[in-house]
Structures are given as C-alpha cells and as structure tokens.
Image: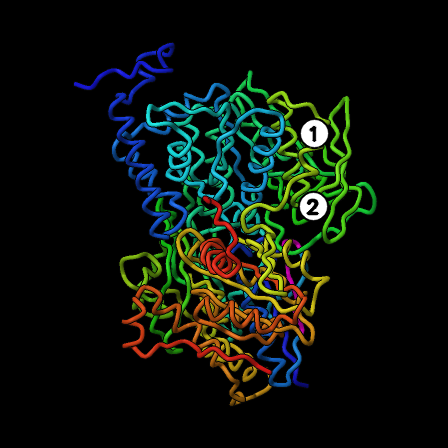
C-alpha cells in the first residue's frame, strides 16, 4: 500500500507565516508521484499517538500561541522524542523549532518549557532578525526568509542544519542555522521553506518512504519554477547587473496558446 | 535669533509654537518645491520626500500645521480599509460643507502625513481646511498621534500584515493601545475581538464608540481561511462565534471569561449585494438611513460603518451621510476600472491574505476572465511574501483562464499557483505583464489585476499613460 500519514501539528495556533504551505508542498509532491497521503491535523487536546505518524510538520506562531500549545506539547513530549529517535521525518519551523528545544524565555522573562528534542535553548531579544537567508546544508543550498526575535543557542553536541551564507541564522552570531537530529529538522526559515527548496522536501519524503515502504529512490519532478524563485530570493540584495553576472536571469516571458 | 511665530497660534501657549515663522515658511516652501519637482520629473506622486525635506528644516512642522486645523485631526488606522474609510469620511465632510485635509494616496507613514499637511498649507503656515482626516499606518500611530493635534482615533481591524515590519499582531495591538490616550474619542470595531479589547487602554473621560456590521439575512459560514485571532485577548481561551461576517470578524463571546462583543453604537445592516451594488442600512440607537452604494464587499460595509460613526461626531446628520455614501466611487487602486480601447482592466490593491481573499471572492464570479497577480517585496509592501501561501488561490482555479504573474516576487506567486493547480505565465517586467494581459483579454471583456502596494503604483502609472487617465495628484 503506497500510503503515508502526514501530521500537521497545531495548524490553527501555529500558522503565522504561511508555514502550512510546507504541508501543501509535501502532499502535492507525494501525489504527483502516485502515493496517497492521509493528512491529520492535530490540535490542542486531540488524542493521537504521534509515533504512528510518518511525517510531522509544525509551523511558527506568536508568543501567545506558543503559551497555549506548550502544555499540550509537554503531554506529547515522550512520543515525539521517541519518534525522532526512530527516524520519523519532522520539520519544525520557527516557533515550533524553539519549543522543540529545551525552553524558550519570552520577552517578559517567563520561560515556556520545550520538549528537548533538539539540544538548544532560546531567549527572546528586543530586535528582530528579518530578511532573506541563504544556508549551506547537507541538502544543498537552502533559501528562505528569516523573521524571528528569539535567539537560539545550540549545545556543542547539537548538529546545526547548516551554515549561514547570507542572513543571521539561529542567533546572529555563530552563523549556525537550525538543527538536525536523525530525520528531524528544526529551522527558522520561512518562505514557506519547502516551496523554494524541493530537494529538502524530497529528502523528508524519501526518509519517510524508506522507513515505511523501503523506497530507495524518488522519481524526479520538474522543479524549474521553484529553483528560479529560490535563485531570485537568494540574489534579491544584488542589483540587476550583479544578478546577471551570476547567471540568474529568471524566466523568459512566455504566453501559452 | 528666530522670530517668534505669532500667526494664527497666538492664542496658544508659547511652547506650542515651537517652529519659528521664518523656519516654518522655509520648510513649507522647500516641501512644496520638492513635491513640484518630483511630480514634474515623474519620480512619483511626491508623497513622502517633501515631508522628509520639510521635517529636516523644521522638525515640528507637522505638529505646528496640525494645530492650525480648528477641528483638529481624526486618525484612522487598522490593517485593511484605511484609505477607503478616510476617503469616505472626507467625501461626507465635503458634501456637508466642511473642508477636510487628508492623504488620499495612501502614503501613511509620518513623512507622508507631513507631506499632505505641507501641501495643504499656504506659505505663511495657514491651512484653509477645517479638519484633518488622516490614515495612519498601524506602526506609525504612536509617533503620529503624539505629534499631531488629535481629536479622535479609529481602529478598523487587525489582520496579519507585513510581519517583517510589524512583528506580531499582539505586540502591534499593545502599541496601538498605548497611543489611544492621545485622543478624546476612540472608535473601535466591535466585531474584531482584538480591536474591541483595546478599550482597556482607553482612559477615563475619553469617549468610546463601537461600530459593527450585521448581515440582515443568511449568516456567512464560520471558519474561512486565515483566522488570525480566534482566542480571547484577555484570558487566551477559545472564542465562541455565534455568527461571522468574514475572517475572524463576527459576534463572539469568550468561553471562559466575561469578554464578549460590545454593543455597537453604529451598525451597518447589509441587506444584500451584487457585483456592482450593495444595499445597506445605517443604524444608530435612535435613527436609521438606507443607502445603495457602488462599493461592494463586506469589508466596505465595515469601512462605511466606521466612516458614519466618525462623521456623526463631526456633526453631520445620518441622512446626509447615507446620501454621500451613495455617491462614492472606488478610491485609488481599490477596484478602479480602466478602459483601454475596447478592453477593461480592473485594478485591486491587496496587501495581505485577508484582502487577497476578499478580492478573490469579488472576482470569482467572473472566471474564466484573465487575471494578473503583481507581488513586489519592497519595504512598503513587506519584504516577507510567505503569506501568499495563506491565500486561497485554489478558488480561482478552473480551466481556460489566462493567469499572469509579475513583480519582483512574481516567481513566488507562480510557485504558489503551481501548487494550487493553476498554470501561469511569469513576466519579469511589469510592462510585458500589461501587454500580455491586454492580449489575453477578449475584446469587450474585463481583465483583473490583484497587486501589492508599490507594484500597484507602478502598474497604475503604466495604465494611466495608456489611457491618459489622471494621476491622483493632477
């Protein structure tokens, strides 16, 4: 049976920056390859064992939303950590990334406990990190938009998702971006991330398919549009001329019949 | 030594006339000059640079000029509908014989407001208008209301918008709340829980007025896309909605504490609307008036309710307000139609998921007409375009429609549309986009354009060259 279970955690509370687009991208790319996908939206209080999921996606939210979900997340702590150890594919963006660490100290000084899936802690800062970011990772170059006030520090044992080439990253100092543990990825990149980084989307899908169905290889899809959009975002700070010198032309206009 | 400015402000305290007369006149002259040059050179409408120049020369120029207005100023803020609402209020006042001053181009940061005051002032620093009706950016409200002599502040709604500049919506609400003490009257949308909760910031002795929209017949379904605040602003529990108009606006009450929708003083009852007309009834506690307007959409019903509430307090009778509302046409880039030869192009400004979704609802009955989406990521648009994924483009899908994407982030739109199952053409140049759109529109038909702010300005300039339509400053 070619079927995966995709869980979208807290879709109502944690969706401030269009991160639900990540779910759309994953489902779409599965369907185009002939797999079926059961999409479950799990909110505060819903009964579900997260160890049964194949892919778990969670997005960013405001401080107030993070407080609302924090308690519910604690109840799912052991399930999530066990799932990550077993290699379930996960993508935690921004607010979810913060709560997948040990704790998040908000602007008013109170601490929201996390689940410690990543060995990281976050402290709020008065100024926001905002802008396009380019990250070199083991999935190739990732492009996204950073927009966060939290500063996340990784433990020396925690592997980051990648190194910042342009932008600020987790704390604007160490040039680390995100965190990775088995197939669980935490990151600050919006965009939504997977819409501009199809390779990362496919890596998550492949991890899930391999674990569930033993699939070794994914059929490639036409990603010209996605790569062009990523190239534009990555070179947005350059002038038109510099962009041409780097070979980023964008697409030629065309009009279908 | 500077001569003390003793003109029309002679009755005020000395400290109020902080600008010397010579310096003020110089600032106004320089501002007006900059405006003239920028318009002649076609840099744009000259809506923000003149303010910058004038402020450099006389830092308190906006404050001094605003004290010239005998009726002082009404500041209108909120995520969506600022331009339309302030335009409506100015229209009503004009019809009632009260001369208003305002910023109709939508340039609503501190500098834009200085520019419009400089434009309205004479070289001596006098303004002929009676009252200022100014739209103010949510994040600029604190600075503007502190500087400008403020009569009232109206908060229309708070949706998610330009998160890179504003940060989180709760923080923004706090920021707006802190500036409400500068006004004597505060108008709040009672259907928007977060806006209505701002009453906690209103000082004692300040007049507090609520406005709302009611649907006369069938209530809209609950749970449309992008519900931004369905949590109680006081205790964080889930809000229960008896009915909603759109997005998170509706009749709510908290499931845990005593917070509920406050009783509005002015209500717009919408009886029904088609694609080009809307019938509504404005009601206060003791009177009511019917009107039929060409501004359609529930978002405009809110704008009209707010405008009516403001105009009532400025002494305009309700019947006159209703008459003025019947005569308005869409403002700058908010549903304007341009005719090029025998084709029509209708231009909609959309800055965030909510206004995009509202526009999509408006143009959906016209599918499969060709449509163009323009998205820029300049600072005035918001540099983050992730919100495109919260827009329900899926509703515009279907066979046959020509779809074009353009703007600095046109490719992002194309990717979004691809995942919505809509095939589109991408133009990197906005001029090509216009040509392609015109080619795609069959003769005698209409094409639709949904655009972010700076792209709209650029596209409108192209259109007005083609149609020789007037720019807003001519």
Image coordinates of residue B365 in percent, x first then y, are 73, 62
Foreground residue, B406 or A14? Answer: B406
When the figure is inspected, residue A146 is found, relative to residue A88, above or below; the finding is: above
Left or right relative to A140: residue A53: right
Query: Could you say whether the residue bearing mark 1 is in a helix, strand or loop?
Result: strand
* Residue at mark 1 to residue at mark 2: CA–CA distance: 21 Å
Chain letter of the residue beneath label 1 in the structure image? B
When the figure is inspected, residue A182 is found, relative to residue A131, above or below; the finding is: below
Residue with the most extreme left position: B1
Foreground residue, A249 or B278? Answer: B278
Image coordinates of residue B222 in percent, x first then y, are 73, 51
The chief SS type of the magenta part is strand
Q: Which residues are magenta?
A: A38-45
Which picture quadrant has residue A167? bottom left
Q: Residue at x 46, y 30 (%)?
A: B178
Return the mark for residue B440.
none
Q: Which residue is mark 2?
A: B294
Return the mark for residue B266.
1
For mark 2, does the 10 Å Cα neighbourhood hold few (<14), some (14 to 19), or many (20 or more) residues? some
Left or right relative to B315: residue B134: left
As for residue A44 lying within the magenta part, the answer is: yes
Left or right relative to B366: residue B16: left
Image coordinates of residue B186 in percent, x first then y, are 56, 26
């Amino acid at each position: 049976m070619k079927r995966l279970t995709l869980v979208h955690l807290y879709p109502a509370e944690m969706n401030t920056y269009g991160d639900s687009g990540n779910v759309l991208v994953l489902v779409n790319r599965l369907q185009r390859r002939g797999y079926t996908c059961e999409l479950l939206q799990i909110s505060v209080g819903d009964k579900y064992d997260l160890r049964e999921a194949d892919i778990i996606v969670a997005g960013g939210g405001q401080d107030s939303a993070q407080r609302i979900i924090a308690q519910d997340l604690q109840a799912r702590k052991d399930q999530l950590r066990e799932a990550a150890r077993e290699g379930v594919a996960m993508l935690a963006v921004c607010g979810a990334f913060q709560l997948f660490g040990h704790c998040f100290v908000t602007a008013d000084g109170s601490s929201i406990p996390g689940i410690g899936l990543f060995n990281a802690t976050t402290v709020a800062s008065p100024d926001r990190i905002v802008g396009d970011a380019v990250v070199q990772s083991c999935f190739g170059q990732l492009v996204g938009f950073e927009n966060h006030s939290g500063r996340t520090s990784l433990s020396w044992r925690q592997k980051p998702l990648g190194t910042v080439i342009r932008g600020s990253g987790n704390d604007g100092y160490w040039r680390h971006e995100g965190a990775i543990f088995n197939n669980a990825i935490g990151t600050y990149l919006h965009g939504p991330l997977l819409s501009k980084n199809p390779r990362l989307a496919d890596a998550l899908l492949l991890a899930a398919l391999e674990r569930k169905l033993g699939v070794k290889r994914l059929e490639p899809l036409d990603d010209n549009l996605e790569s062009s959009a990523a190239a534009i975002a990555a070179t947005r700070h350059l002038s038109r001329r510099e962009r041409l010198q780097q070979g980023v032309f964008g697409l030629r206009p065309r009009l279908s019949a | 030594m500077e001569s003390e400015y003793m003109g029309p402000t002679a009755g005020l305290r000395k400290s109020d006339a902080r600008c010397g007369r010579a310096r003020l006149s110089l600032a106004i002259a320089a501002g007006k000059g900059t405006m003239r040059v920028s318009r002649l050179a076609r840099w744009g409408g000259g809506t923000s640079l003149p303010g910058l120049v004038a402020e450099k020369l006389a830092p308190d120029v906006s404050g001094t000029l605003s004290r010239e207005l005998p009726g002082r100023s009404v500041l209108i803020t909120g995520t969506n509908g600022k331009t339309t609402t302030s335009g409506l209020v100015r229209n009503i006042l004009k019809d009632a014989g009260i001369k208003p001053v305002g910023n109709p181009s939508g340039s609503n940061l501190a500098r834009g407001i200085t520019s419009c005051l400089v434009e309205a002032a004479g070289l001596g620093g006098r303004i002929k208008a009676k009252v200022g009706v100014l739209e103010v950016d949510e994040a600029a409200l604190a600075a503007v209301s502190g500087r400008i002599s403020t009569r009232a502040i109206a908060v229309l709604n708070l949706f998610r918008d330009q998160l890179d500049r504003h940060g989180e919506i709760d923080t923004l609400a706090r920021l707006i709340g802190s500036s409400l003490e500068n006004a004597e009257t505060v108008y709040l949308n009672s259907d928007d829980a977060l806006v209505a909760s701002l009453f906690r910031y209103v000082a004692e002795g300040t007049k507090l007025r609520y406005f709302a929209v009611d649907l006369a017949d069938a209530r809209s379904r609950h749970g449309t896309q992008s519900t931004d605040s369905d949590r109680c602003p006081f205790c964080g529990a889930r809000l229960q909605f008896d009915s909603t108009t759109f997005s998170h606006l509706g009749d709510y009450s908290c499931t845990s504490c005593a917070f509920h929708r406050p009783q509005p003083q002015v209500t717009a009852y919408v009886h029904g609307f088609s694609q080009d007309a809307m019938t509504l009834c404005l009601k206060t506690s003791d009177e009511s008036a019917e009107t039929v307007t060409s501004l359609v959409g529930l978002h405009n019903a809110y704008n009209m309710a707010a405008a009516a509430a403001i105009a009532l307090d400025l002494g305009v009778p309700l019947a006159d307000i209703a008459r003025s509302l019947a005569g308005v046409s869409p403002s700058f880039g908010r549903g304007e139609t341009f005719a090029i030869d025998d084709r029509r192009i209708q231009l909609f400004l959309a800055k965030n998921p909510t206004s995009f979704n509202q526009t999509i609802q408006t143009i959906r009955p016209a599918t499969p007409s060709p449509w163009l989406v323009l998205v820029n990521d300049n600072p005035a648009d918001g540099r983050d375009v992730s919100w495109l994924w919260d827009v329900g483009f899926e509703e515009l899908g279907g066979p046959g429609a020509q779809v074009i994407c353009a703007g600095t982030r046109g490719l992002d739109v194309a990717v979004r549309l691809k995942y919505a199952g809509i095939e589109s053409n991408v133009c990197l140049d906005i001029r090509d986009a216009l040509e392609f759109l015109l080619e795609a529109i069959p003769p005698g038909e209409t094409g639709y354009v949904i655009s972010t702010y700076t792209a709209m300005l650029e596209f409108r300039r192209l259109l007005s060259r083609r149609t020789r339509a007037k720019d807003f400053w001519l």
